[in-house]
């Protein structure tokens, strides 16, 4: 599959932190708007519909996991 | 006349909310009794082709068939045209087809030529596009022209062609399918009579009664949002451009469209909420303030007001034995993108030559199947495009609305955001994936591939006159035509194929180089064009055997 799921950042914590901090102080509504913009910006940067499709598939699979095994997440 | 508007045909709300102020002069045609009506049911007159519905699609198809030497009976259940302006945007491809039918220039002369569209968000312009950025095409990207003018010009052309027998107030009330013919029952002011036809083409619009008579389904998606369409008459200084607003100051939270037509008439389209009461909204006293807010004044008169919802749907099959469906009877789209009337005209263009060949025994019936293949794929593409536009204009979930808002916001600063804004993707001809095409065997870095429509280009005749490739194609006879970029050698081509030769020693000269560029041509390059002006095959080096094979494939002879 063309989507890269290897760890691509030298410091993954920096990337995660950067996104988390971008949401600090935002309401849920503002956060949702920010996420929508980020998704579109990053999708365009990738510029490959097959990669985007794989990313959607992967994202949705995890969504299903989260809702079906809600209690198992705290381990 | 078919009162299904081709645009906005899509489920325009009829009856209680029907158009209230068709103030244009309608053109009235007379019913005339025909000798066929004297014949008893068991000895009905037989005709090779009966077309049902004298709208733009039926009229154009009749003219094309007549120009190909076929006799056509064209039936319509009404006797006038001129109700509302309905379709207004006619594409370059439609104009090129009409040009071959002898009415293109008249349409352009009357129409409003445009190619620029602007998209606004609030009071700010986000994006501007030009649909025909290059010169050297005979026809413009689009004209706006009220459908009743288009129909009137087509009727005028029909009346010059004795091969077309146009019968007003002839309403098909029953249809029986047989192995070798179709039997029709037709109601007239003088009572019913019967006809038999080798083929019936149903161009009877979105509410096609023939569709019901063959028992065909018509499935698709209904959109809940309502749109108010108003044609207003005023003198205004707005430029001749298509203006589309998201969330305009004069119509908060919704979308709006402004577009110019001939005779100082402007098309205005306002999105309403799904729960708006159509009977209330369409009253002129309620429409007027909205439009006055939009225009900044109230110095205008209404020509036409209509409220509609739209549907995107198509028939599973466009051919039911000897009954063939074309235009809105076969498929419906939302109006944003000018894909209704134009796709119907592309249906007519696609079907005309095929039906003529089958009627003459030049091709087997299998050629007609390619009409279904090519045009149903085109319908899918049109439905996909117009559904996307509609979804963008009327997001259905909160997150969809957020994503749209993100696009509109990003568009202020980024090119990719501008390109994602979807205020209607305007009709361009489909590229057919079709068994009639011969796959490329040579290397190409441009030019129309097999299944694509021929691009126009400016040319000069040996005598020094300016002309266009589309005119040369029309003059060559609108049949299979070999377009050759000459290399000095005489070519050996089949008799059934007409020829257009471009080159320094040929009849036509590519003085600007545009033809060579648009066709990725080198000396010796040749394109086999179908009678509808689509590319069947292309060659870097011509051989008679290769042309014959491509011709056989494109005419379904093998």
Image: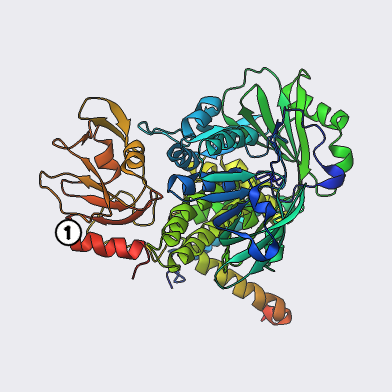
Is residue B313 found left or right of B302 in the rendered image? left
Q: Quadrant of the N terminus of chain B?
A: top right
Q: Residue at x 21, y 42 (%)?
A: B501
Occupied quadrant, residue B324 = bottom right
Percent x, y for residue B267?
68, 32
Say above or below: B281 vs B312. above
Depth check: give the residue in front, B194 or B198.
Answer: B194
Protein chain holding label 1: B
Q: Residue at x 85, y 49 (%)?
A: B275
Q: Viewer-proximal residue, B464 or B191?
A: B191
What is the quadrant of the C terminus of chain B in the image? bottom left
For label 1, count other residues whose C-alpha is less than 10 Å away and answer few (under 14), some (14-19) or many (20+). Answer: few
In the image shown, does B63 or B306 lie closer to the viewer?
B63
Instruction: State the count of labels.
Output: 1
Estimate the x, y position of residue A13 in percent, counting from the top left: 53, 64
- The x, y position of residue B341, in whole percent, is 59, 45
For disc 1, the marked residue is: B543
Q: Is residue B414 above or below residue B553?
A: above
């Amino acid at each position: 599959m063309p989507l890269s799921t290897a760890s691509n950042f030298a410091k993954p914590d920096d990337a995660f932190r950067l996104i988390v901090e971008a949401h600090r102080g935002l309401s849920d509504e503002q956060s949702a708007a920010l996420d929508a913009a980020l998704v579109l910006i990053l999708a365009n940067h990738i510029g490959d519909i097959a990669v985007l499709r794989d990313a959607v598939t992967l994202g949705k699979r995890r969504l299903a996991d989260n809702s079906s095994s809600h209690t198992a997440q705290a381990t | 006349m078919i009162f299904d508007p081709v645009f906005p045909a899509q489920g325009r709300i009829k009856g209680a909310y029907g158009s209230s102020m068709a103030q244009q002069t309608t053109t009235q045609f007379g019913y005339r009794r025909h000798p066929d009506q004297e014949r008893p049911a068991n000895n009905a007159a037989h005709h090779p082709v009966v077309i049902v519905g004298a709208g733009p699609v039926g009229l154009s198809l009749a003219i094309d068939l007549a120009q190909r030497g076929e006799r056509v009976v064209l039936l319509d259940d009404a006797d006038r045209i001129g109700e509302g302006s309905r379709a207004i945007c006619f594409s370059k491809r439609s104009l090129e087809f009409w040009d071959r039918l002898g009415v293109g220039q008249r349409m352009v002369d009357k129409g409003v030529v445009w190619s620029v569209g602007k998209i606004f968000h609030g009071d700010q312009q986000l994006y501007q596009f030009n649909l025909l950025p290059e010169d050297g095409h005979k026809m413009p990207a689009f004209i706006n022209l009220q459908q009743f003018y288009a129909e009137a010009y087509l009727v005028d052309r029909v009346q010059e062609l004795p091969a077309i027998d146009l019968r007003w107030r002839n309403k098909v009330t029953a249809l029986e399918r047989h192995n070798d013919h179709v039997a029709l029952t037709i109601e007239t002011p003088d009572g019913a009579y019967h006809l038999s036809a080798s083929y019936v083409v149903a161009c009877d619009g979105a509410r096609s009664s023939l569709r019901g008579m063959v028992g065909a389904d018509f499935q698709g998606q209904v959109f809940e949002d309502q749109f108010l369409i108003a044609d207003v008459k005023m003198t205004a200084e707005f430029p001749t451009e298509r203006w589309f607003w998201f969330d305009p100051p004069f119509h908060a939270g919704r979308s709006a469209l402004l577009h110019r037509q001939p005779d100082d008439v402007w098309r205005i389209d306002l999105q309403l909420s799904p729960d708006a009461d159509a009977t209330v909204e369409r009253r002129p006293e309620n429409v007027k303030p909205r439009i006055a807010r939009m225009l900044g004044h109230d110095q205008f008169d209404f020509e036409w007001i209509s409220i509609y919802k739209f549907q995107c749907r198509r028939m599973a099959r466009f051919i039911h034995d000897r009954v063939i469906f074309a235009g809105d009877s076969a498929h419906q789209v939302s109006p944003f993108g000018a894909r209704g009337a134009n796709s119907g005209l592309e249906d007519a263009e696609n079907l005309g030559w095929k039906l003529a060949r089958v009627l003459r025994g030049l091709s087997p019936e299998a050629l007609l199947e390619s009409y279904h293949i090519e045009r149903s794929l085109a319908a899918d593409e049109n439905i996909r495009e117009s559904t996307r536009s509609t979804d963008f204009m009327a997001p259905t979930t909160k997150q969809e609305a957020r994503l749209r808002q993100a696009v509109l916001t990003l568009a202020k600063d980024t090119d990719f955001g501008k390109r994602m804004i979807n205020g209607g993707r305007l009709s361009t001809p489909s590229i057919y994936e079709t068994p009639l095409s011969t796959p490329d065997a040579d290397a190409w870095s441009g030019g129309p591939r097999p299944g694509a429509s021929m691009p126009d280009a400016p040319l000069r005749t040996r005598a020094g006159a300016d002309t266009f490739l589309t005119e040369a194609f029309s003059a060559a006879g609108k049949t299979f035509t070999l377009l050759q970029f000459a290399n000095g050698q005489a070519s050996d081509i089949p008799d059934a194929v007409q020829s257009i030769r471009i080159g320094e020693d040929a009849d036509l000269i590519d003085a600007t180089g545009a033809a060579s560029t648009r066709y990725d041509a080198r000396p010796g390059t040749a394109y086999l064009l179908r009678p509808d002006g689509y590319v069947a095959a292309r060659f870097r080096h011509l051989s008679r055997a290769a042309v014959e094979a491509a011709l056989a494939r494109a005419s379904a002879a093998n």
